[in-house]
């Protein structure tokens, strides 16, 4: 499926979800003490300004070149959050419209974030294992397109036996991850993703 036009209302929704994702990433990274690249700390605020402006201008200036250029700028700001936000906005099976309020942070959208060594106490994956599970609660809808595993700062491919990779499945509130190589004690794992709760 082709991406929606930058001037479409779907792109406005993608920008709104991206705004929340950027604010959430900022919160998670600051809690972990990670430094931000220049501009990362203000992305959610900048998206709010541009998104609100284009939303207002749609009624009065939607046929102008300036409106199209501003919408293109908004899409460029979304950047790395585009695919994740697009998957959330366009996955309406069983959920209807997904409402996310970036200002208050109240949402049915939940973030998965784990960072660990297999030797850490309570790590979901231990040394020598190839399979582990993550519980997100029954009644949740797993956004598999947003799931990602990074090992020692390298993003693992999905379902590729030519490389260190993984497969992910979901049933009844449990995410099951299967690696094609056993975990080593010194590997740093970072696992991210999103899911929706229906309650």
Image (cartoon, rainbow, N blue to C red):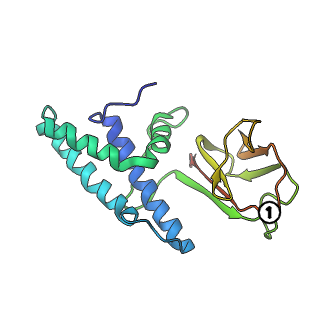
Q: Residue furthest front?
A: 162
Q: Quadrant of residue 145?
A: top right
Nearer to us in this view, 192 or 12: 192
Q: Residue drawn at (51%, 35%), measured in percent from left and top?
A: 91
In the displayed image of the protein, which residue is found farthest to the bottom? Answer: 33
**Residue at image location 43% in from the left, 57% down from the top:** 22
Residue 25 locus on image (x, y percent): 49, 61
Q: Seen in the image, is 66 located left or right of residue 94?
A: left
Crowd rating for badge 1 (residues with CA inside 10 Å; few <14, some 14–19, many 20+): many
Q: Residue furthest right?
A: 128
Look at the numbered disc 1 and give the secondary structure of its residue.
Answer: loop
Foreground residue among 110 and 128: 128
Q: Position of residue 7 (x, y in %)?
A: 26, 35
- Which residue lies under the disc numbered 1? 118
Numbered marks: total = 1
Image point 21% across, 40% down: which residue? 69
Is residue 28 in view from this perspective?
yes
Please say whether residue 171 is visible from this viewpoint: no
Q: Residue 16 vs residue 149: left or right?
A: left
Which x, y percent locates residue 158? Answer: 68, 39
- Left or right, 115 with reference to 162: left
- The x, y position of residue 102, in whole percent, is 39, 57
Q: What residue is shown at x 79% (from left), y 67% (from top)?
A: 122
């Amino acid at each position: 499926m082709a991406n929606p036009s930058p001037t479409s209302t779907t792109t406005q929704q993608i920008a709104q979800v991206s705004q929340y994702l950027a604010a959430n990433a900022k919160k998670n990274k600051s809690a972990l003490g990670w430094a931000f690249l220049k501009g990362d700390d203000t992305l959610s605020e900048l998206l709010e300004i541009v998104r609100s402006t284009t939303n207002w201008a749609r009624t009065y200036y939607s046929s102008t070149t300036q409106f199209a250029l501003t919408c293109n700028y908004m899409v460029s700001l979304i950047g790395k959050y585009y695919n994740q936000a697009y998957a959330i906005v366009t996955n309406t099976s069983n959920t209807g419209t997904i409402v996310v309020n970036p200002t208050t942070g109240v949402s049915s959208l939940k973030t998965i974030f784990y960072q660990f060594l297999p030797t850490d106490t309570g790590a979901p994956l231990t040394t020598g294992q190839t399979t582990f599970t993550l519980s997100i609660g029954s009644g949740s809808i797993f956004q598999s397109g947003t799931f990602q595993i990074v090992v020692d700062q390298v993003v693992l491919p999905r379902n590729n036996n030519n490389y260190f990779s993984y497969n992910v499945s979901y049933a009844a509130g449990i995410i099951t991850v299967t690696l094609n190589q056993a975990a080593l004690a010194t590997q740093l794992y970072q696992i991210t993703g999103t899911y929706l709760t229906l309650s």
